[in-house]
Each structure stands twice: as structure tokens, then as C-alpha cells.
Image: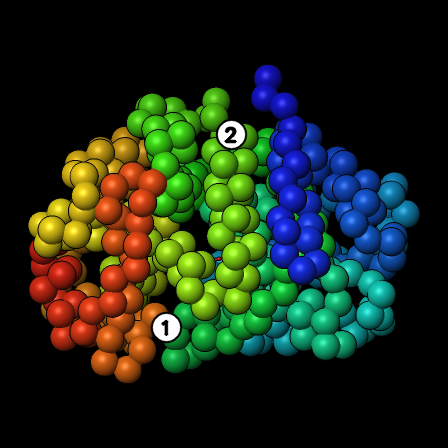
Amino acid sequence: MESNQTITIQTRPSYLVHIGSGLLDRCGQLAAEALTPCRAAVVTDSNVAPLYLSRVEESLRAAGFSVCAHVFPAGEARKNLSTLSDILEFLAQEQLTRSDCVVALGGGVCGDMAGFAAGCYLRGVAYVQIPTTLLSSVDSSVGGKTAVDLRAGKNLAGLFLQPSAVVCDTDCLRTLPPLERADGTAEALKTGVLSGEELFSLFEADDITPHLSEIVGRCIAFKGSVVEQDPLDNGLRRTLNLGHTAGHAIEKCSGYALHHGHAVAAGLAIIARAAEALGWAEEPCAARICAALRRHGLPTGTEYAPAALAQAALADKKRRGGSISLVVPRKIGKCEMVTVPVGDLERIFAAGWEDR
Ligand code: GLY
């Protein structure tokens, strides 16, 4: 039986991340430790609502919050301005004031939509994150990045707003469909490559289920330390994008049919192999990374050719004029930014490319 843990994220303002079993039924009490009980608008989607909404509402009410809920249709395709507009209209209809709060219940799309709405409704109200997927638990629920997709691309409109609290009930992670579990595993494994052996080696076992709490805790502790140093993503925080330059390109080439975590897994494998082939690595680690990815049902290659990936990466947010910064694994626990001319991208992707 793993014990619950609480991690403090020392941003301004600071907040607590609670991780453990049975926390959905305590989310009201934990939210009330961060916020004076007020009107709470729970924002969730049509997949999550039937599973967890009533428990969250009940816990919030028991802690003194008055609760309303908005459920939007589930799916990545709903992460757009129209859904955002519906949420904002709902908050206004419910007459939320600046002393009230939003509660994001669900995966990354819910967190992004609810966080963005909280950040712009009345120029900003507080919000609490209750992640229910592995991906949102290990990454997006912490750090305050929120965004929606525009027709021109993914995550092109957004804002930074740190949550007031994060409540991660690890029981939700034990029943995820395999595809969703694998998606989150990719981001967590990526954090292992960034942070070091203690986390990375957990993915060298066949089954991570017994270690879910430890994995979430280690990922959040690592991400928190990075976000504390660079909350607005001006430097160090960009290293969290390990695997994402090729990953985003793969996602784009697939017309976003491939899940984000699966694309990141292939992107991570490509840059790890490229780092060795191009002499950037201090110690070989690509074979270990690829073996761990495969063990958890994740791809280590792609059918999209290096030229197509390089073309897709030109629109990447990480591009600055004629150059782009890649996060390169030197060894497990040491990754650094390398800035290259965009014209070199195809050669770099080719150095690490493998078919699926
Ligand atoms: N997901 C990367 C970040 O929050 O910066």
C-alpha cells in the first residue's frame, strides 16, 4: 500500500499537489485548504462526467462549496475556441464572481480548457486541477500552461495560470484504457530520461502499475523544480519538450490521428538515436530508451520520412527565425538544448530515423 504524498510547487503563488489513493472523495477538503469555500464551477467532459463528477460534486459540497458543472463533448477535436466560448458563457450564466473558482476534472483537454477559461473569465479566477489520466497527472496538470488549438495549429492560443491546488487520485490511473495508459507512460518515461535513473529505471519493469504513485510523484517533483526556475517557459522549461520536435511533426503528419504520447515516444526514440549517431551523446542510451518504450506498447519509429518530418517541424513554436532548438539526451539524467539551423533538421531526423 503506497502512502499519499504532497509536493509543494514554489511558484508565485505556490501551491500543493496531492497525490494518492482515494483523493477524489477528499478533493473538497483539499481545495478548501487552498481556497475559501465559494461557488465552484466544475468543468469536465462527457467521458469523465459519468465516472467521477458526482463524487467530486459531493466532496466539494461537503467542504462548503456551492457547485455547478459544465460537461462538454469529449475529444481532442473539442480543444477549440468554440468549447472555450461555451465554458465562458456558462461561467457568466452561473454568475461566478472573482472570488469563485473553476475546477478542471479530467485529462489534458479538460485541464487546458478549464484553465484557459479560468485565466480569462473576469480577467482571471482561481482554479483547481483534478487530473484523471496519467498524461495529465504527470505533466499538464502542473505548471500552469493552458491552451486551445486554432485552425492554424495546435495550442496556438493560451495563457499561463498556476492552479491553486492539484488533486491527483491515483485510483483513476489504474483503470485507464491501455492506449491512454501508454500515452501517459510516454511523457513519464520522457521525464525519466530528463531526471535520471531513479525514475527511468521504473520503466524497465514490465508492469508499472505497482509504481504509479511513485512515478507520478517523481514526475511532478521534477517538473515542479523546472517550473519553479522558469515558470514562463523562457529557457530551462523548454527541456521538458524532449522528443517533442520530431513528436509534434509526427503528430502533424498523421493528421493528429496518432495520440500525442505515442508521437512523443517515436520522437524521443528518433532524437536519442540521432544524439548517438551525431556524437552529441556522452553515454549510449538510445537502446535502453527504445527497449523501455517498446515494453510499454509505444512506438520507436515512424512511417513518415525525415524530409516530411522536417517540413512539418518548420511551423514548430520552438523555431526562432532560421534556427530551432532541440532537446538532446547526453545520457539518462542529462539533456541539453542544442540550437541548429532549420536546414539541418532533415539530416538530424534521418540520423535517428527508423520505420515503425
Ligand atoms: N508540458 C511541458 C510544459 O509544461 O512545459
Instruction: State whether residue 91 is above or below residue 243.
Output: below
Alpha carbon of mark 2 to alpha carbon of mark 1: how far?
A: 32 Å
For marks 2 and 1 on the same chain, the one whose residue lies earlier in the sequence? 2
Q: Considering the numbered disc 2 on the image, is that residue within a helix, a strand or a loop?
A: helix
Residue 244 in which image quadrant: bottom left
> In the rendered image, which residue does mark 1 sit on?
317
Report the side of 313 relative to 109 (left or right).
left
- Give coordinates of residue 125: x percent, y percent: 75, 67
298 vs 314: above or below: above
Estimate how packed mark 2 is, as few (under 14), some (14 to 19) or many (20 or more) residues with alpha carbons within 10 Å.
some
At horizontal 48% and vertical 44% (from top left) the residue drawn is 222
Please identify the quarter of the rendering in which residue 290 is found: top left
* Residue 29 image-quadrant placement: top right
The one nearer the camera, 316 or 254, is 316
Give SS at disc 1: loop
Q: For mark 2, what is the residue? A: 214
Q: Are marks 2 and 1 in contact (CB under 8 Å)?
A: no
